[in-house]
Amino acid sequence: MADNASSAWADCYWTSRDGLRLHYRDYPADDRPGSRDRPALLCLPGLTRNARDFAALAERFAGAWRVIAPDMRGRGDSAYARDSSTYNPGQYVEDIGLLLAEAGIARYIAIGTSLGGLMTMLLAMTAPERIAGAVLNDVGPVIEAAGLARIGSYVGQGRSFPTWMHAARAIEETQAAAYPGFGIDDWLALAKRLMVLSSNGRIVFDYDMRIAEPLARIEPGTQPDLWPGIANLAGKPVLLLRGGLSDLLSPATLEQMRAALPGAEAVTLPDVGHAPTLDEPAAVAAIERLLARCLD
């Protein structure tokens, strides 16, 4: 473990069963009363995202809570898989199980964006007793075909850019519909979440392009049944977030989830598509309410 002297987190590593060195950021709880007795916040990123995606959230809540933000295999500072078929939610959940053991985390609050929300549902199907609460960010047991096709249209293209401005404009080209209120500063910030400066001086996406291969092999109608994961979250504090412009989580599915989780709070964020950044004021306030419920 090597502390980052300029930041509030430690860069930590764990090892997968197939021998990959995987990275996570560990933002510690501080010495205020009760902080270290609380469940950790386990931040699970979307398909092409990494630990940086939760930097603002972690900086907001760390100290009062321990925050764990992993780079899943093939992303960020984690090793790339030798076998691209291991880029699948079941493997990610196995990796997370080993991370929890390595970090000594018995109970946690899952904050899952998109793929991270699918992982949360799978975790709830395998060890629901360890989940103290959950945020499902713009994802549910039913994934809309249009959203999946849109994601598949750009993942794994392997583009590179000479400047951060070029990178930001490229992100805007593919995601403008999801963030209609973004200005250039927002696009630059998003580019720096998604991309990294490579050794040859070009700016590249910070993931293994081969994560697209399993996605391309998904057959229509073959999605696993994740409703048991929703059922296993019943009785726990749960926040269901949906972008009002989302093409991945439909209003109908959100209503079904809310019906299955009578105590859950459902919040739709207007003028945001897939997926909310969790920096939106309404999202921050909803997460704060969820964490308060987890302390009741």
Image (tube, rainbow, N blue to C red):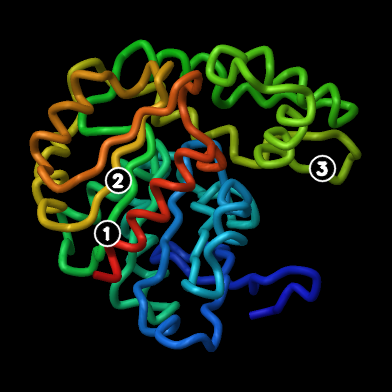
Residue 109 picture quarter = bottom left
Q: Which mark is residue 198?
A: 3
Question: In which quadrant is the N terminus drawn?
Answer: bottom right
Q: Residues within 10 Å of mark 3 (few under 14, many from 20)?
A: few
Above or below, 190 relative to 108: above
Q: Secondary structure at mark 1?
A: strand
Alpha carbon distance from label 3 to label 2: 37 Å
Q: Identify the amino acid type marked 3.
A: Ser
Residue at the spot x=73%, y=68% of the render? 7
Identify the element where label 3 is drawn. Answer: loop
Distance of label 3 from label 1 (alpha carbons): 37 Å
Tell me the quarter of the image containing the C terminus.
bottom left
Q: Residue 110: where, in percent of width, then height?
A: 35, 56
Q: Which kind of residue does numbered mark 2 sit on?
A: Leu
Relative to 100, residue 74 above or below: above
**Along the horizontal axis of the image, is 53 left or right of 213?**
right
Q: Residues within 10 Å of mark 2 (few under 14, many from 20)?
A: many
Instruction: Using residue 55 as the reference point, say whether residue 153 is left or right of it.
Output: left
First-in-chain label (1 vs 2)? 1
CB within 8 Å, label 1 to label 2: yes
Mark 1 Cα within 10 Å, few/some/many (few <14, many 20+)? many
- List x then y, in percent, for residue 12: 59, 72
- Residue matched to label 1: 133
